[in-house]
Amino acid sequence: DTEVTQTPKHLVMGMTNKKSLKCEQHMGHRAMYWYKQKAKKPPELMFVYSYEKLSINESVPSRFSPECPNSSLLNLHLHALQPEDSALYLCASSQHLWRGTGANVLTFGAGSRLTVL
Amino acid sequence: AQKITQTQPGMFVQEKEAVTLDCTYDTSDPSYGLFWYKQPSSGEMIFLIYQGSYDQQNATEGRYSLNFQKARKSANLVISASQLGDSAMYFCAMREGDNNNDMRFGAGTRLTVKP
């Protein structure tokens, strides 16, 4: 079983809907990430949180709104999405932000597969 | 500019044989980390092995080893004694610098293990 839990596993939504993706980890990690992965492509970074503060926002459209209510939880709020936003959304966590040395491995969840109609 | 290059879109290997998945990278930063992840069809990214730029020895983790050739900027993954469960997508990734938190992934290689 993965130590990063993502819900829901599958989500189908219309372009006018508001939904949220949730991610939870209990490893005591202080950095959490959202990645987007289109079919047959590598993951692309969307957001990074460190100690519950937004550290990186990779120019993601405002229809994606991240939230980190505490060190264990990471949400991605979705509103007015487009069909091209259909993808696998991966959450990950690491002990801390990258410091140039040491593995600081990212542990990923199983992903939430989003389809926008 | 492409930082991580995986030139093999697909690879086949016979069960119980070894296979090498290629990865080259591009960075001018002396401090970086190289990672390999496995992604089965279920979608989860599974960490396999890590190599730091200052590590003197090649990393090994069970059946996985990393052939790190720093001068050539290559970090090939070697899987020994392939198993059917090794069939998956494999991504090489890099984090560079001291404060760069963007892990860049290569395009991936799909490995199929034949019985």
Image: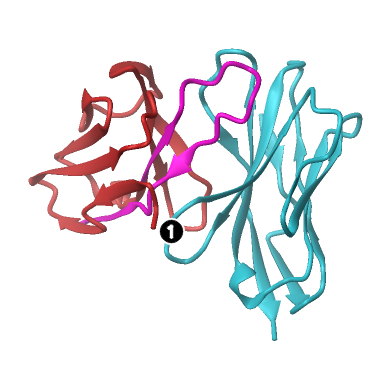
Chain colours: A red, B cyan
Query: Looking at the image, is A6 positioned above or below residue B55?
Result: below
Query: Looking at the image, is A47 positioned above or below residue B79?
Result: above
Quadrant for the N terminus of chain A in the image: bottom left
Can residue B67 be seen from the camera position used here? yes
Q: Quadrant of residue A93?
A: top left
Identify the residue position indicated by label 1 in the image: B43
Residue A114 image point, x, y percent: 26, 54
Residue B115 image point, x, y percent: 70, 86
Instruction: Please give the name of the residue rendered at 52% of the width and 26% of the height, measured from the top-left corner.
Output: B102
Chain hosting mark 1: B
Residue B12 image point, x, y percent: 74, 73
Q: Amino acid at mark 1?
A: Gly
Part of the protein shown in magenta: A90-117
Residue B1 lies within the magenta run: no
Q: Nearer the viewer, residue B4 or A59?
A: B4
Residue B19 image point, x, y percent: 80, 64
Residue A104 lies within the magenta run: yes
Residue at disc 1, secondary structure: loop
Q: Is residue A17 left or right of residue A81?
A: left
